[in-house]
Image (cartoon, rainbow, N blue to C red):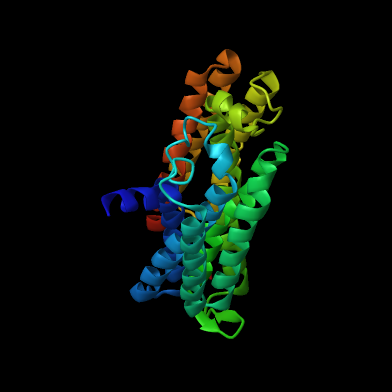
Amino acid sequence: MKQFISDFGKLVKLRLNLTVVFSASISFLIGAQQQGDVIWINWLILTIGGFMITGSANGFNEIIERNLDKLMVRTQDRPLPAGRMTTGQALVLSLFMGLFGTLLLLQLNFLAGLLSVFAIFLYAFVYTPLKQKSPIAVFVGAFPGALPPLIGYYAAFESAGFGFEYAAVSEAAIVITPWVLFLVQFFWQFPHFWAIAWVADEDYKHAGFRLLPTTRKDAVSAWMIFISAALMIPVGLLPMYYGFGGWVFTIVSVLGGLLFAYYGMKHVQERTDATAKKVMFTSFFYLPLTQLVLLFDFIPLK
């Protein structure tokens, strides 16, 4: 049982999964603040459903890449390439998680369930095959990667047929808030994944993955990492610009963006794995920290 639990955690990419669920749950609480009421049972449903949806997408990803994972040191110990789990077992688990997670989110509202299915499809069956074909995979993968804030935010509203009821919340608020959260997470993924791709480039090459902007650890790729990192400064200002981010959040997000840009420039100058790791570690802290600060420094739009 202990081995199965460990393998299940690797199949669903537990740390990545929890990061995604955290993002969705924070957005749920922001949406609940927007309408003035937190329904905690719905938050629990979202958390469980989001875990299942993300686990399903990651499971399908590992099934598709099971032979490639054997070629990379960082993935050789996953249950499929290591032979501790069969493809059939992983498929059953992934299908169950996808169906159960979707049914749970449909209990909240139709839009949350629909976006979840779309996220699984984009991540597992569009982004995953592209990783071997073109660096554009990072751009494509940024879309399902940024969907959790949308899913979480809209899950906070009562179901109403094919949509959701939003009571006294204005049309502008229910469009602007979640899509700004989407954009912040969308742009964050470029310095995050390109920095990872730089550090893991040699390992990725064994599987034929082409994730750096030029497919090489060259000056252009380094500059693209810097530019994407520096973009987090203006992106971090969007919540305040649209009226729902307070000064505390704005200061934290801008400082985080400046740190991103600083390490990005250091990477342009030195182009080493060590400097890429600093961009990567900054990304690990930036997103959950700014999301958590925004939750407590949120100004509901009218």
Q: Quadrant of residue 281?
A: top left
Left/right of residue 220 with respect to residue 281 in the rendered view = right
Depth check, front residue: 106 or 154: 106
Q: Quadrant of residue 171?
A: bottom right
Residue furthest bottom in the image:
161
Q: Residue at x 39, y 69 (%)?
A: 43
Residue furthest top in the image:
270
Q: Quadrant of residue 192?
A: top right
User: Vertical placement of 9 versus 272: above or below?
Assistant: below
Q: Return the x and y of residue 31 as percentages of the image width and height.
A: 47, 67
Q: Return the x and y of residue 114 as percentages of the image width and height.
A: 60, 71
Count the marks: how many?
Answer: 0
User: Vertical placement of 67 versus 51: above or below?
Assistant: above
Q: Residue at x 54, y 53 (%)?
A: 239
Q: Return the x and y of residue 261 as percentages of the image width and height.
A: 55, 29
Depth check, front residue: 101 or 66: 66
Depth check, front residue: 198 or 88: 88
Depth check, front residue: 230 or 159: 159
Left/right of residue 25 with respect to residue 191 in the rendered view = left
Q: Return the x and y of residue 49 as percentages of the image width and height.
A: 44, 67
Quadrant of the frame with the N terminus:
bottom left
Q: Is residue 46 visible?
A: yes
Q: Residue at x 60, y 19 (%)?
A: 268
Q: Residue at x 57, y 21 (%)?
A: 265
Q: Is residue 188 visible?
A: no
Left/right of residue 12 with respect to residue 134 in the rendered view = left
